[in-house]
Image (spheres, rainbow, N blue to C red):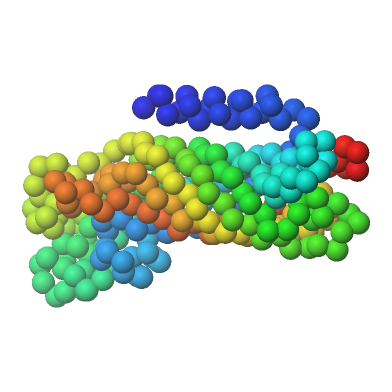
Amino acid sequence: MKTPITILFVIVFFLEIKAQHYTHDIGGFVGSTSLQTDYGQRNHFGSELNNEGLSFSVAHYLSFYNKTLRWDPNNVMHNHLMIKTDLQYVSNTKLEHHGIYAKKQSFGGEQLRAMKGSVRMLNLGVNIEFYLKSLEEFVYPHSDVSFNPFFTFGVQYSFFNNTLTSDLGDWQQDISVLPKKYQSDGHIDVGSGESFVFNIGVGTRFKLTEKLDLVAQYNYQYFFSDKIDGLQAEVFENKNTEWGLNIQVGLIYHLNFSLPLFY
């Protein structure tokens, strides 16, 4: 799995070399990540809401609005785009079964309720952010623009580690403490792993000062793996990959605020 990591680092390095004279921001974020996995009933709101953990991110932003007039005064696209590279850490997300099957007063329901998992991950990514309002008008102090909503999409590469326990006993010594569908060979894959992640989301910046922005963002994360939680309930079909909802707030600082060339 070294090849995907190398590709991401090459992309980031190339962007940094090409961007030495452009505008740079740095940011820090905190929030929560809710995971939809094989824990819980599929498409069950309780599973999506309760299986969550804290998330922390640091990010670098590259923008081009101070070069717009030099490149092409008629091309406004440069004035709305940012390239974001980020590093995200998701702390131990507690995973439990929720829904109608876990609520059943039967031995199967008890097995589901007793089954507990966790996952933590580190994600490295590259994203494109498209801002609805001109970045030049938003950033410069002469403007009255305070809010600037944006759309974002991109890819991440995730390193994750998961665990599995049962309140009924040690499943590694006695697999029968787990629900029947997880007792077959190949349905449990606990440990570390890696996966590509597709991101899409929305957010907004609010200008606090000339060089500081408050940011709120909401992302949907689609993992190209069914092993994030360590379970493979449909090991032969493998239809249900994992996904997450990530909500964060943070602060962004403008490193080299400057007027555009020929402004």
Q: Pick the residue in front: 42 or 181.
A: 42
- Residue at position x 22%, y 57% from top? 115
In the image, residue 117 lies at what x, y percent? Answer: 30, 52
In the image, residue 225 lies at what x, y percent? Answer: 31, 44
Q: Is residue 161 above or below residue 134?
A: above
- Residue at position x 16%, y 66% from top? 110
Q: Is residue 143 left or right of residue 178?
A: right
The answer to whether residue 177 is visible is no
Q: Is residue 74 above or below residue 261?
A: below
In the image, residue 203 lies at what x, y percent? Answer: 61, 59
In the image, residue 77 lies at what x, y percent? Answer: 69, 47
Q: Is residue 252 left or right of residue 110?
A: right
Q: Is residue 167 above or below residue 24?
A: below
- Residue at position x 22%, y 65% from top? 113
Q: Quadrant of the N terminus?
A: top left
Furthest residue in direction front, as rendered: 74
Q: Quadrant of the C terminus?
A: top right
- Residue at position x 51%, y 44% from top? 154
Q: Pick the residue in front: 11 or 110.
A: 11
Q: Quadrant of residue 262?
A: top right
The answer to whether residue 126 is visible is yes
Q: Quadrant of residue 37?
A: bottom left
- Give the mark count: 0
Q: Pick the residue in front: 156 or 137.
A: 137
